[in-house]
Amino acid sequence: MRSVDEHQRVVAGLITARPPVDVAIGDALGLVLAADVVAPLALPGFDNSAMDGYAVVAEDVAEATDDRPVKLVVAEDIPAGRTDALTLEPGTAHRIMTGAPLPAGATAVVPVEATDGSTETVSIRASVRPGQHVRRAGEDVTPGTTVLRAGQVLTPAALGLAAALGMGSLTVVPRQRVLVMSTGSELVAPGIPLQPGQIYESNAVMLAAAVRDAGADVVTSSMTEDDVDVFRAELQKHAQHADLVITTGGVSAGAYEVVKDSLAAEVEFVKVAMQPGMPQGSGVVWGTPIVTLPGNPVSALVSFEVFIRTPLRAAMGLPHPQRPHLSVTLSEALTSPPGRRQFRRGVLGVDGDDVTTYGPPASHHLRWLASADCLLEIGEDVSELPAGSPVQVWDLS
């Protein structure tokens, strides 16, 4: 059998990054920058008011109090967006809104709450210091400053900064495009009444969700019957638009193994020393890497976690591509088949320092995986572990 570590290396070698592309900032959330962003202009771009109020010469209102307000003629009204250049004459005030350009000659802004709000002659009841309530040009960003770094994940705040700097697009590492295919003549789409011997398709839905959760895009998610010609036609139709193909089912040793029968020339089918998920395959079809997973639902999702999720995220430059691995205390005794690395469903304790196995180990018990928050990783050389033993877990939360 092939070891888990060896198959991880094989699959990782298939999944490679796409060349950087420019995308509109509205489509860039969660992507990784491929190039530094250097500010082409200042933020703020001009001196502006931090408050709704009145632009003044600070010395003109230095003696203003509640009992003895200073009265100034309101010479101009400056809403945000006014573009003509204005000059404040000493002994006057300009009513000004937040974000509006500060007129030349003004040295401070008096908040409207410290005035009577007049539009003709304003009574000012408080003094202000020079520069108070004024946002100076360039105090946030100066031109030529590197404000975002290559390798940084684009958050809402980062996109807001890019937009504030007038950038309509950014150079990013694009998402991987993944084709998910589920095989089996017994499969029926949800919503269609079941006939005897049929089951509802779940693997394609589950793996497409796992792909998206990892940060990649799903080209399409489809299912096919156990027919070689139908399978190959569907695969060829979509593979050229994908960076990676993931199939489930049809890779075991029995009859009607459509993936194995269809791709014997392109895919290396192997047995990996693990439970669940022993039958695996990898290769290249029509120029696109393919990873073939077993059809039992727990085997399929565990295999995705063990072999695909980490290199998929790494190819997109995402930080921390690997699930957190923790060493915790096993709260109960367990046994494991020797010679195979076992991945058991588990639930972490409240404090996260102990773990309990959750549900049977068989690969068709999807219910238990749906409620688990970790996978216990038990080595190939371990056949039993007593309660209180340290054990490695993959934190799925």
Image (cartoon, rainbow, N blue to C red):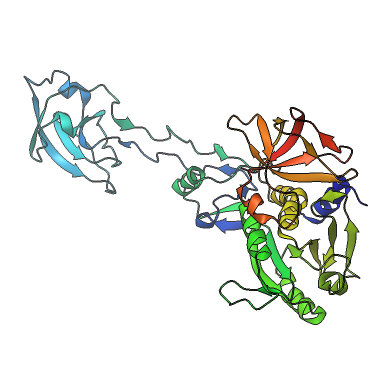
Count of number-bearing discs: 0
Tell me the quarter of the image containing the C terminus: top right
Coordinates of residue 145 in the picture (x, y in percent): 54, 36
Residue 15 visible, this orientation: yes
In the image: residue 34, left or right of residue 272? left
Q: Position of residue 326 (x, y in %)?
A: 70, 33
Looking at this view, is 220 or 49 the one in front? 220
Q: Is residue 7 left or right of residue 361?
A: right
The answer to whether residue 18 is left or right of residue 12 is left
**Towards the viewer: 85 or 51:** 51
Whether residue 214 is visible to the viewer of this picture, yes or no, is no
Instruction: Name the one closer to the observer, 81 or 236.
Output: 236
Residue drawn at x 78%, y 77% is: 226
Q: Please name the residue shown 26% across and 37% down the image.
A: 103
Q: Considering only vertical position in the picture, is 73 above or below 130?
A: below
Q: Is residue 396 above or below residue 71?
A: below
- Residue at the location (83% across, 52% down)? 13
